[in-house]
Image (spheres, rainbow, N blue to C red):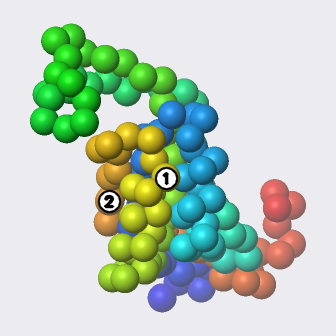
Amino acid sequence: MPERYQIETGLRILVQCPAEALPRVQAAVLACDPLAHGDYDRVSFSSAAGVQSFRALGGGRNRATTDTVTVDCLEWQIFTTAQDAALDALLCAIYDTHPYEEPVIHLIPAQRCRHRRGMDEDNPNR
């Protein structure tokens, strides 16, 4: 095992969401998981605005569209070690607060690297 860092296994969750809805989704997730990362919590990342595109097929609440629709969205990323009921609660929080009928949510098995406390304290780059 390396002295400098430790590796944790979990999920990287990516959620595409309109910017105005993201604070509501974030708050719901944080009520389920503090998104801890060592001495920090509420650790997440959101990209600059991008464009999500889709065509409604008419099987859901929205009528079918002939052309592709585009919507400005952010992509929000988090890492969690939640499993089973805790992961279900986190995903339900996203579904309950996201404005889309079928939100784009990707679950990617991932590992993260965490520092070991007390290491590198004299590093001038900290």
Q: What kind of element bears circle 2?
A: strand
Can residue 9 be seen here? The reply is no
Q: Position of residue 25 (x, y in %)?
A: 54, 52
Residue sitting nearer the eye, 121 or 18: 18
For image coordinates 45% across by 68% down, the residue present is 90
For image coordinates 83% across by 75% down, the residue present is 121
Residue farthest along the bottom direction in this orientation: 1
Q: Position of residue 18 (x, y in %)?
A: 51, 34
Q: Amino acid at mark 1?
A: Thr
Query: How many neighbours does mark 2 have within 10 angstroms: few (below 14), some (14-19), or many (20 or more)?
Result: few
Quadrant of residue 69 within the rendered picture:
top left
In the depicted structure, whether residue 101 falls above or below residue 41: above
Query: How many neighbours does mark 1 have within 10 angstroms: few (below 14), some (14-19), or many (20 or more)?
Result: some
Indicate which disc, 2 or 1, sits on the residue closer to the N terminus.
1
Q: Which residue is mark 1?
A: 97
Q: Position of residue 55 (x, y in %)?
A: 21, 23
| Mark linked to residue 108 | 2
Q: Quadrant of the C terminus?
A: bottom right
In the depicted structure, whether residue 68 falls above or below residue 84: above
